[in-house]
Image: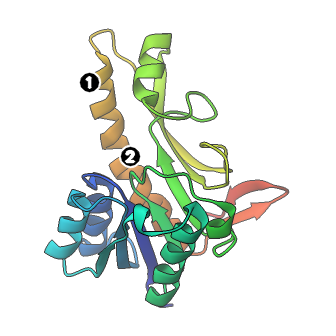
């Protein structure tokens, strides 16, 4: 079985991208990042890609007539790369059905909360302000909603009495860096299935 080819979409520093690069380098997962794409010219994720000789592109949203045209341009770049799985790593745009229809059940994202609780932006602060005792992160399939896709895997992070919202966010990020490569590894082993509209992992 050949390595799973993945494309990564990122808008910022790309720390989750780095966790994938590291896991692949350590041979923890059988995958290959074939393209990194960003909607931000100065995204450090692009530099991470260049540092590791991964093909990367910046696509400027304002250069396209509308959201759908932009998404179709992204999709074309991904298809050109031969990627089998699209991985969002801090990509700050909601993808349209035009994009998602190109890759059915092949687009995943990670969210810094235990979905369906605290979707959207600043999820760690939402959880902290609410006073939850356990937070964490969730890897899910991407649909046209805001963090509403089918849940693939979750990792819990306890909220400590000494936490601030920022400290909690930092600890959740550590959990993300462990969970995301693990899930990509499961895709590479073809162990993730959708049965009766729920995700099942075959161990």
Q: Is residue 169 left or right of residue 82?
A: left
Query: What colouring style does the render use?
Result: rainbow
Q: Residue under label 1, please give it.
A: 167
Q: Tag 2, which secondary structure?
A: helix
Residue 203: percent from the left, percent from the top?
Answer: 61, 63
Left or right of residue 135: residue 152: right
> Residue 186 at what x, y percent from top left?
53, 66
- Considering every residue shown, the one lying at the far right of the view is 196
Determine which residue is flagged by label 2: 176
169 to the left or right of 113: left
Tell me what residue is drawn at x 44 percent, y 12 percent: 129
Is residue 194 in view?
A: yes
Residue 151: horizontal and vertical position, in percent? 64, 48
* 114 versus 35 height, above or below: above
- Residue 173, image quadrant: top left
**Which quadrant of the structure image shows residue 59?**
bottom left
Q: Which residue is more in the foreground, 192 or 5?
A: 5
Residue 28 marker: none
Packing grade of label 2 (10 A; few <14, some 14-19, many >=20) is many
Q: Which residue is at the far left? A: 51
Compared with 109, 24 (above or below) is below
Q: Give the alpha-carbon distance from disc 1 to disc 2, as whole Å.
A: 14 Å
Q: Nearer the viewer, residue 54 or 139?
A: 54
First of labels 1, 2 by sequence position = 1
**Observer-nearest of 98 and 173:** 98
The secondary structure type at the circle numbered 1 is: helix
- The answer to whether residue 54 is above or below residue 137 is below
Q: Residue at x 43, y 85 (%)?
A: 3
| Residue ID at (37%, 61%) | 39
Q: How many marks do you count on the picture?
A: 2
**Residue positioned 47% across, 89% down in the render:** 80
């Amino acid at each position: 079985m050949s390595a799973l080819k993945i494309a990564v979409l990122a808008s910022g520093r790309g720390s989750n991208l780095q966790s994938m690069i590291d896991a692949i380098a350590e041979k923890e997962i059988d995958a290959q990042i074939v393209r990194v794409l960003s909607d931000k010219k100065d995204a450090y994720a692009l530099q991470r890609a260049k540092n590791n000789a991964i093909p990367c592109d910046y696509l400027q949203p304002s250069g396209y007539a509308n959201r759908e045209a932009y998404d179709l341009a992204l999709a074309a770049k991904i298809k050109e790369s031969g990627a089998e799985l699209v991985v969002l790593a801090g990509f700050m745009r909601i993808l349209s059905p035009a994009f998602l229809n190109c890759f059915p059940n092949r687009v995943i994202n990670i969210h810094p909360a235990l979905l369906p609780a605290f979707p959207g932006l600043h999820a760690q602060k939402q959880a902290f302000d609410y006073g939850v005792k356990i937070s964490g992160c969730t890897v899910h399939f991407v649909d046209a909603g805001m963090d509403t896709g089918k849940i693939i895997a979750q990792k819990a992070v306890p909220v400590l009495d000494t936490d601030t919202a920022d400290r909690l966010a930092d600890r959740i990020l550590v959990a993300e860096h462990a969970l995301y490569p693990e899930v990509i590894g499961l895709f590479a082993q073809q162990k993730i299935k959708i049965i009766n509209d729920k995700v099942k992992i075959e161990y």
